[in-house]
Image: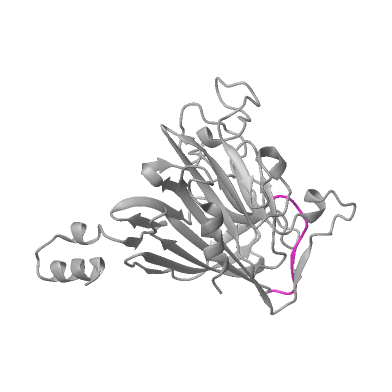
Amino acid sequence: MSPLSLAGALLALGVISPVAAAATGVSITQLDDRVRIEIDGQLFTEYRFKESPKPFFYPIIGPGESPMTRDFPMKETAGESHDHPHHRGLYYGHGSVNGVNFWADTPGIPGRTVLDGPIDVTSGETTGTIHLRDKLVTVDGKLVATDERTFRIHQTPYGPMLDFEITHFAANGDLVFNDTKEGSLAIRVAESMVLKYSEAPGKDRNREGRGRIVNSEGVRDGNTWGKRAKWVDYYGPVGDKTVGVAIFDHPGNPRYPSWWHVRDYGLFAVNPFGVHDFDRLENPAAGELKVPAGKSVTFRYRLFFHAGDEKAAHVAERYAEYAARK
């Protein structure tokens, strides 16, 4: 009998409490303003969909109970930088969708990602699933597009993994992802993991950090920005541990392998649309992607939260396993 089935049987018999029964596997609970994800009874992350113009995951607790995302602006933590307040945990957005900014979320930015209907959640022994739909609207309510998102959270022997699948629908005429480096699936890593400090109280600007960046092609650190790669890994110290997060680009994605908007100060994003910025082309629309009215486009990624550097975590092997999936 599986651990979850055994827990359910014991719960039905009154042998264990509901709290104990829920402390096995991947447990997903929907609340009024967020979805809470626990692995073996411990918080992994929350999907927050009301407190910002775009939804996001925060915090993310990695191996060894290591907090892997910057706290600002959700929480004030001593010594953290306050740049780019729209870098909230793990999020998805693009800086120009039909000319509307869905990347930033500061006052005056018109793009809003609004939950459209109920959220479906399923807990499981090793995998939990969240499924939802969104409307992309302007500040005055005009519909730009819709999307459908599926998140799968996996408990694995190597560390937690989060599959991020998004389908964009051209639901109100043609849908155009304009060429800009500001996008798309992004995480702002913990301050201690950065390659360089951009700004922080009591710290010199651009002081060297202890984090490192490496991609599938062997390119490292600041040279990874704007390069194409199958995966990128960002790792560094959190407390007395070294932890990292790798993002995998699925081979079935348009424009695979993607370009990467990965910064030394902690922003880490995969962006298949910013070609003119990344390749320094004269044509400002070189990376534009158009979805005809009534059609859709899907992107799939995996985030792997691991202990150690990319070699200790066998990131290349974990990517090969992911890439082999249809």
Q: Tell me residue 230's x, y (percent).
A: 65, 58
- Tell which of 38 and 93 is nearer to you: 38
- Tell which of 318 and 101 is nearer to you: 318
Q: State which quadrant residue 219 falls in.
A: top right
Q: Is residue 294 visible?
A: yes
302 displayed left or right of 128: right
Q: Is residue 101 above or below residue 133?
A: above
* Residue in the image at 59% along x and 51% along y: 186
27 displayed left or right of 301: left
11 displayed left or right of 103: left
Q: State which quadrant residue 26 falls in.
A: bottom left
Q: Tell me residue 101's x, y (percent).
A: 69, 54
Q: Quadrant of the N terminus?
A: bottom left
Q: Is residue 53 visible?
A: no
249 displayed left or right of 155: right
Magenta-colored segment: predominant secondary structure: loop
Q: Quadrant of the C terminus?
A: bottom right
* Residue in the image at 71% along x and 61% along y: 97
Is residue 39 magenta-colored? Answer: no
* Residue in the image at 61% along x and 27% along y: 208
Give the extent of the magenta segment.
Answer: 172-182
Q: How many marks?
A: 0
Q: Tell me residue 146's x, y (percent).
A: 61, 70
